[in-house]
């Protein structure tokens, strides 16, 4: 199969998605309508989600290793009677064949065949300079080759070279720290090949490059076996047309990328494919980087990029809530340097993970694609200084177990579709974020939003899976639409009133699944009335402590859903398949109990106004629950400029009786507003309050003709 045909096959499979092999499982083993686990624990779901409409079978054929490798790539045997033996003698070598020339410490192989090398060569070089059609097998059988001023192994010309690591042998190739030109080629690696290079066998190879790269092929670089230990000042392994790994063990420490495939001249080349293997990569740059597509079918990966999350650059803080807002004409600042990319796995094209076990600690994104990113299986533990998973285009999760222990944003893409798998994530900003434009650390824009209008083609669709989100910013944030048709979703949202557990600029619809989202009340949002599944939004009378349980019961007293919050919160959004129009429910938030009758499919929704910043579906003044507590109206957001979070009481508030006179009737609807009477102060004075962002916005749009704020605003 030609290189272009193999590249086309790889690209096609990555665009389609995939099922997995090996330990990763299979995409077709995950049902879109998979029922969440039932139970009566702290975070349990008693009712299950139906399969979403028009569920699809997303399994597609997997690329077989035979599509990426030839039979000879894995062949390590040879005829010992016809093989040519080269013995290194520290400063020179001995060989009885005329196909090998020896000039001091330079040994040149000039013909097709098998060459077995053993011994030690100090400050020398082995060169392969054969016919362009020649296939050459070089067997390292206890070979130690060092060159202080160039490559120790230089493949100048051949059709393809097979570098075999003989069973039970230890081999070493090293560069001493500089490269002196010996011909027109820019030799810059301890092992440097102008043509295709395959490494196979079961022995070990230690590669040290005090300058330049460890192993470089200017065509295809393939590995089908062996144990490689690489330390390089530059890239650990680099292939211009591709890097293809069938199996093997790799320990790579590099001053640039661990694995680097890059071809700026041919868009069909520069890809990286891994069928299996065990990888430990510590890279100052990216752990793995492909200028086109990157696909992993299986394997074990421990990757540290850019020093890990402890070396992440600080993120700019601006706008409401201290993050993520940019107004027309403004520019979102980013303090990240773009000169060095420090991502775990990066593809300039598409990135596809079919299986494997990943532990990634990166200063920048853990997994990054300038195109689409798909997860069809695998187990992931990710600590990221920026996004855990990022795609400039579509990001899809079909299956897998994902644990993002630390990140700036957990999962980000222009579109996000989750149909299966288990996801737990912690983010200092948004948990899930659908946003148009490139990653802020690349060219072409950033996360900053120049308006509050919905972005075309941007959406989040959750049709299955199990999600636990802990976010310092918005829990689930779509700059376009948000749709939930299945799955189990728990969100511990922000504790500041500048963000919400749910946020969207377009529509928000729920047609299935179970969701509990808790967070601050200032920017709380819920689902639209066009939803077909009932949804309840209630703000507690006071901030609830971490560890507070949220429970929803039906009219008969049967538990529908229970969740124990991980952080303080005031706002609660609950939805489950058994929440239906016209029915009555009891919502218990700690010690607060609310009786709720579903007079509308989205209880607590404020219709008919674009509301505050970022969305319209915020809690309204009406449709309050019949509460057993004295006050269920949300308190205003505290002014965070004071040390204790409370705004100082305004002067001259000692009104007799502790009541504020009603404002004059301006003719506006809802002309009377009852403020809380039990202020918790011994003298009856009103406690400190401030107006939330969305209330300010409403005041600006509903003010009276004389410029005064109307009553009820």
Image: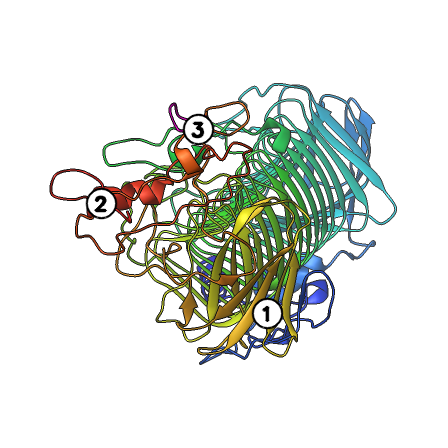
Residue 712 relative to residue 624: left or right: left
Instruction: Tell me where residue 257 sits by quadrant.
Output: top right
Q: Residue at x 64, y 51 (%)?
A: 565
Q: Residue tagged by mark 1?
A: 19
Q: Earlier in the sequence, mark 2 or mark 3?
A: 3
Residue reaching furthest to the front = 656
Residue 370 within the segment the image draws in magenta? no
| Disc 2 + disc 1, Cβ < 8 Å | no
- Between residue 159 and residue 619, name the one nearer to us: 619
Q: Residue tagged by mark 3?
A: 316
Q: Earlier in the sequence, mark 3 or mark 1?
A: 1
Residue 464 is situated, as x and y percent measured from the top left of the image, at 55, 69
Q: Nearer the viewer, mark 2 or mark 1?
A: 2
Residue 395 is situated, as x and y percent measured from the top left of the image, at 47, 57
Secondary-structure class at tag 3: loop
Range covered by the magenta-colored residues? 649-653
Circle on res. 710: 2
Residue 419 relative to residue 309: left or right: left
Predominant secondary structure in magenta?
loop
Residue 483 is situated, as x and y percent measured from the top left of the image, at 42, 65
């Amino acid at each position: 199969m030609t290189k272009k045909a193999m590249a086309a096959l790889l690209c096609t499979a990555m665009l389609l998605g995939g099922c997995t092999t090996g330990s990763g499982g299979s995409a077709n083993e995950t049902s879109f309508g998979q029922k969440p686990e039932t139970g009566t624990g702290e975070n349990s779901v008693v009712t299950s989600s139906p399969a979403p409409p028009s569920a699809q079978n997303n399994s597609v054929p997997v690329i077989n290793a035979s599509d990426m490798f030839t039979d000879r790539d894995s062949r390590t045997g040879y005829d010992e009677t016809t093989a040519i033996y080269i013995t290194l003698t520290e400063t020179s070598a001995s060989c009885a064949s005329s196909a090998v020339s020896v000039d001091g410490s330079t040994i040149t192989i000039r013909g097709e065949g098998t060459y077995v090398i053993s011994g030690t060569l100090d400050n020398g070089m082995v060169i392969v300079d054969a016919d362009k059609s020649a296939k050459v097998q070089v067997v390292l059988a206890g070979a130690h080759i060092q060159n202080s001023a160039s490559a120790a192994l230089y493949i100048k010309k051949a059709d393809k070279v097979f570098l075999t690591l003989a069973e039970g042998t230890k081999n070493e190739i090293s560069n001493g720290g500089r490269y002196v030109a010996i011909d027109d080629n820019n030799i810059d690696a301890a092992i440097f090949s102008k043509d295709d290079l395959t490494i196979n066998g079961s022995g070990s190879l230690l590669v040290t490059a005090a300058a330049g790269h460890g192993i470089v092929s200017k065509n295809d670089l393939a590995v089908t076996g062996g144990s490689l230990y690489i330390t390089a000042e530059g890239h650990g392994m680099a292939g211009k047309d591709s890097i293809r790994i069938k199996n093997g063990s790799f320990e790579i420490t590099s001053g640039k990328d661990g694995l680097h495939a890059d071809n700026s001249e041919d868009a069909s080349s520069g890809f990286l494919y891994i069928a299996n293997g065990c990888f430990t990569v510590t890279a100052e740059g990216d752990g793995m980087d492909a200028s086109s597509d990157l696909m992993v079918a299986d394997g074990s990966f421990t990757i540290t990029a850019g020093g890990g999350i402890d070396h992440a650059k600080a993120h700019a803080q601006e706008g409401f809530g201290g993050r993520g807002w940019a107004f027309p004409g403004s520019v979102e600042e980013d303090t990240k340097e773009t000169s060095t990319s420090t991502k775990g796995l990066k593809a300039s094209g598409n990135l596809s993970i079919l299986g494997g076990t990943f532990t990634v600690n990166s200063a920048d994104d853990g997994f990054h694609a300038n195109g689409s990113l798909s997860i069809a299986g695998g187990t992931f533990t990710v600590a990221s200084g920026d996004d855990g998973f990022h795609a400039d285009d579509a990001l899809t999760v079909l299956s897998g177990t994902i644990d993002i222990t630390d990140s700036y944003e957990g999962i980000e893409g222009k579109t996000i579709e989750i149909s299966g798998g288990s996801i737990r994530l912690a983010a200092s900003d948004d948990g899930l974020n659908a946003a148009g434009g490139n990653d802020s650390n690349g060219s072409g824009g950033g996360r900053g939003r120049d308006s509050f209008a919905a972005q075309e083609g941007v959406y989040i669709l959750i049709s299955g899976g199990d999600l636990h989100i802990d976010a310092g910013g918005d829990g689930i944030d779509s700059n376009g639409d948000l749709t939930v048709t299945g799955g189990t979703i728990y969100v511990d949202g922000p504790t500041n009133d500048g963000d919400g557990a749910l946020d969207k600029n377009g529509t928000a619809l729920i047609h299935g699944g179970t969701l509990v989202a808790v967070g601050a009340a200032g920017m709380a949002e819920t689902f639209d009335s066009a939803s077909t599944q009932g949804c309840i939004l209630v703000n507690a009378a006071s901030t609830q402590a971490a560890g507070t349980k949220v429970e929803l019961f039906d009219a008969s007293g049967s538990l529908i859903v229970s969740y124990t919050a991980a952080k303080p919160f005031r706002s609660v959004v609950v939805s489950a398949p058994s929440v239906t129009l016209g029915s009555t429910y009891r919502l218990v938030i700690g010690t607060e109990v609310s009786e709720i009758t579903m007079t509308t499919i989205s209880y607590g929704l404020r219709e008919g106004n674009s509301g505050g910043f970022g969305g319209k579906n915020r809690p309204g003044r009406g449709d309050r629950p019949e509460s057993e507590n004295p006050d269920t109206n949300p308190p205003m957001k505290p002014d965070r400029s004071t040390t204790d979070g409370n705004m100082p009481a305004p002067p001259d508030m000692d009104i007799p009786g502790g009541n504020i006179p009603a404002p004059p009737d301006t003719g506006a609807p809802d002309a009377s507003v009852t403020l809380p009477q039990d202020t918790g102060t011994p003298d009856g004075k009103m406690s400190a309050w401030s107006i939330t962002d969305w209330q300010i916005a409403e005041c600006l749009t509903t003010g009276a003709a004389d410029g005064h704020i109307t009553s009820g605003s």
